[in-house]
Amino acid sequence: MSTLVSSEVGVGSWLVARWRVVVLVSAVVILGLVATIAVVVPALNSSDEAGAEGFDCSQLEESSFDAAAPKAMACEVDVEVTGERTPWSTTWATSEGPIRLEQSVSPSRTSVTGEWTDIDTTLEVDAETGVVSPIAPVFEIELNGGTGRPLGAITREGKRIEVGSPVRLPVPDIVDGRATYRIADGVRLIVTVNEDGTGFFPVFELATPEAAGTLSSLLSAQRAAAGGLPAGGNNALQLVFPVSMPSGLHLEADGNAANVVDELGETHFVVPPPVMWDSAAAERRGPELLEVRAATGAIGAVDDRLAAPLPGDRVSQMALHVESASVAVDPDEAMLTAPETVWPVYLDPGFNGKPAADWIAVRTGGYTGSLYNWGDISSTMRGEGAGYCSSTASCNTQFTQRLIWEFDGLDAVRGMVGSDVISASFTVNGEHSYSCAATTTDMHVLLEGVSAGQTWGSHNWHQWTLYSSRTEAHSASCGNQGYRSFDATSAVKHLAEYDWSTLPLGLKARDESTMTGWKRFRHDATLSVSYNRPPNAPSSLKITNPDSPSCVTGGGRPFINSTTPTLSAIVSDPDGQIVNSRFKLVSTAAPSTLLWDEAAAEWEAASGTRFHSTLRSGVLSHGGTYAWRVQAGDWALLSPFSAWCEFTVDTEKPNPPTVTAVTSGPNIQAVYEPNRERGGKGLKGKFRIGPNGSSDVVAFRVSFGDPNALTSTTVAAGASFDVEHIPARSGPMTLYVESVDRAGNVSPTRTTYQFEVASPVEDVIWKLDEGSGSSSADRGPKGADPLTIAGAGWVAGPHQLFGSRTDDMALKFDGVNDAALGGGPVVDTSKSFTVSAHVRLADSKLGLGNYTVLSQDGVTQSGFRLGYRANCGGGTGCWSFGMPDTSSGASITAASSSGEVTAGEWVHLVGVHDATAKTVRLWVCEVGTPDASATGEPVATAPVTRAGTAWQASGVFAVGRGQNADAGGDWWPGEIDNVRVFSGQVADDSKLRRLCQGAEVENFGQGAAAFDAVDPTVREQ
């Protein structure tokens, strides 16, 4: 939608309401138009609002901007965002809206232990490993415990260097927070962790000239054993420190210093310029004292010769040589041999993890070194100076000096644009000025950063650009000593705009020709930035009423069925500020005209809220295609626009669907024509549902029997859909169908397709009503062979006995060898089937054996058995229907009745095999006697799952006996009547009730007569 342009005027008004501090943002270009937008801060704390309700204002820390910003405004107090915390920086959501970031030169805390704590460089010894470590440094630091490990190791941001020792190390003494290794008589190596916890500095203490010779001999012997020579010269006292680094890092010289850098040139570890000093402070106060930096890294450590020279000590820089895997330090042989040297003498290299801020002092006057990460000169002369220092009691020589601080770790600011930065200040501690006359100190921004080896001569002074100034004096004698802030707003804006990796700031005296402008500053500077980033571009755009989650343009745009939809989007702010939003809509046919330009229903809400805008009636019309997008605002800034989303309005309902019965095809078992009795329970049918001419129909809602339980099925636009149905019961059935088009419109009327599922029909019926002769004919449609009667005699049947039909007869079996046999298999026992009969068990035979009513012979045993079992558990008998799991196995799966079996009473038994479900089930309907009729209500057992696979018993159908070991057995003692077989079907409840009909005498006769009056040969299958 990049070509879509709309005219959007009056944009500013939507952000104005209930605000208190006004910020004017001008020249805002929105879709090619320039507007002036008044954007203001929400008065969340006005007297008519809840204020701090819901916030615990005593807890001034939150883990995220989203949690901190609302609390800050509600509680009218700044709240720290702990998720942004580093050892050097702290970030607050402020009560006035902006975010404040404060970056310190020195770290104030550490999370190396897993939680934020104060820095603690007190040394501890691990009892198991012997490693010496500070309790809570900024970077993980390990020192040698006399176990053969390197001298020390530093881990910074997952990268670790190990620094070896020039001499063998004994077990150290841990005294006063230092690890002291007694190398030899008069020779000690004293290792101290930097006060800021970023590195360590080893200091060799040589007590006498003889001790220097002893160290030289030790070094010479160690070099001879290793076959090595001094690097860069023949200094006998050269100290070589092997450096082990991970892959991707290497050593690189930096003047008289060294850095461990990666392939991109980023510094990870620093070896500052090494220095040495004697103990002459008690005898003299030389100019060198002003040339001392806290090279050891012991910032703030004053009047401690093991950390840095004292005022008056002779000081000399030692030469540093860089090899691929080591750094070597050459002590000043002139100092070691000079008669005026006062012993002990101290040799001090250092190893630091690169901190988030560096600082340096560079000067003229013949001094070519640098004061890297300088501290205080002494307890009475704090900080370092900027300006011109002449040969007076303060300087002892003439030089010009400038101070530089470089802030790293400003990634949050680098991700902004310049306009996000509201203000910034650089604050330094003004310790001293030579004169109480007000002089000007300028703050410059440098285009090159700070490095440990930088000097006045190597610095590019033309890259200094003036940004701000202060004209004043500051010292205790002037009465205005303390912190001074320089305006760094432009500098930080440029850092954000041009994505500078660091921000180097320099201080210099405006007049460097006179000592009047000389001022001394402490190193502990801070950079404070107040910023507000615009809200993020709204995301997750979708229409929520009607629901249409797609946000696309072009052919994939959604169709909706409403002219008053609700548009929505999630609005968030990177600073967690309270946000609001505005929805804009145009027609794709006339994109230059805004049809909708309204604020969301949620005027203001927390970052991450989904905002909604419901269009008024009359804005949209059927058939129109529209595009919309969203813009957000916080207390001062507007977000970028979201992407465009499109939709088309379609309020025209589709035609009611058509329904026809599918007449052929795989697995179709019945054709359910409308308003006709067809098929049956368990017989699958199929119906074709058509769109009835509506080409945009994409779904059909379908239900069999329940108009309130329609389920939806999607289809290709305008396509038909075939739905299968397997009836679970017989009787009338209604198919309900609705069409749904691509916009969600539902057909105005529901199509109803009515059909009737036929009741199960017996295909074999031996009524046994002949009354004489040796056979009984099949009255069912299958035309099975007649039953051949062997031994059984004719008696009055239950219908006659109950007085409902005088011609009803039955067969009586003696339980010895009587039977009635059909020709060949009648039932396919591998498929579903139902068998039933009315039976009466003789009084004298109850509990004496197993008796079979109906069966069909297999190879050696019956394929099924319906009858009586003498012991079904607990010594009691039961009615049973069972099938062997295999054709020859003894295991039988049977369903058994739970009620008491009463001899001499008529009972209707039904055995059901469901091949699909792989179950057998028994139905028992007690008919009773003519003198005491029963309920006539069929009672079913639970389905019992078969263990084996159904198999076909291919022998004769037998009435009155079963088959055991390929011979007749389990002969029935009593009467049998009305034998029926349902091949391939599972009889339903209504059918079984009609077959039973034994609750009352008149019902028995009437029900049977009513059923028998229907000629089964013409019943629809």
Image: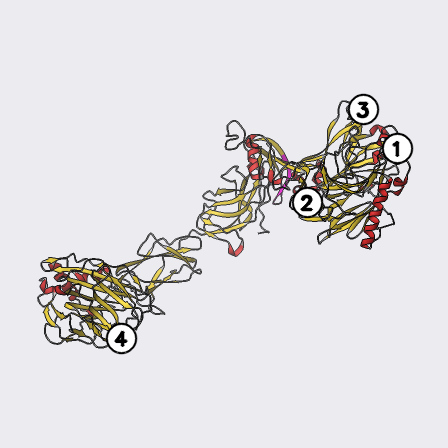
Distance from the alpha carbon under mark 2 to that under mark 1: 46 Å
Query: How many neighbours does mark 4 have within 10 angstroms: few (below 14), some (14-19), or many (20 or more)?
Result: some
Q: Is mark 2 on a helix, strand or loop?
A: loop
Is residue 10 among what the camera can see? no
Distance from the alpha carbon under mark 2 to that under mark 3: 53 Å
In this figure, which residue is indicated by the disc labeled 2? 131
Distance from the alpha carbon under mark 2 to that under mark 4: 87 Å
- Give the quarter of the image for residue 916: bottom left
Q: Do the residues labelled 4 and 1 touch (CB within 8 Å)?
A: no
**Residue 166 location (% of width, % of height):** 79, 47
**Residue 700 location (% of width, % of height):** 39, 57
Instruction: Compare marks 3 and 4 and give the one earlier in the sequence.
Output: 3
Q: Specify the label residue 436 is tagged with.
A: 3
* Residue type indicated by callout 4: Thr
Instruction: Compare marks 2 and 4 and give the one earlier in the sequence.
Output: 2
**Residue 771 location (% of width, % of height):** 10, 72
Name the mark nearer the viewer: 4 or 1.
Answer: 4
Instruction: Compare marks 2 and 3 and give the one earlier in the sequence.
Output: 2
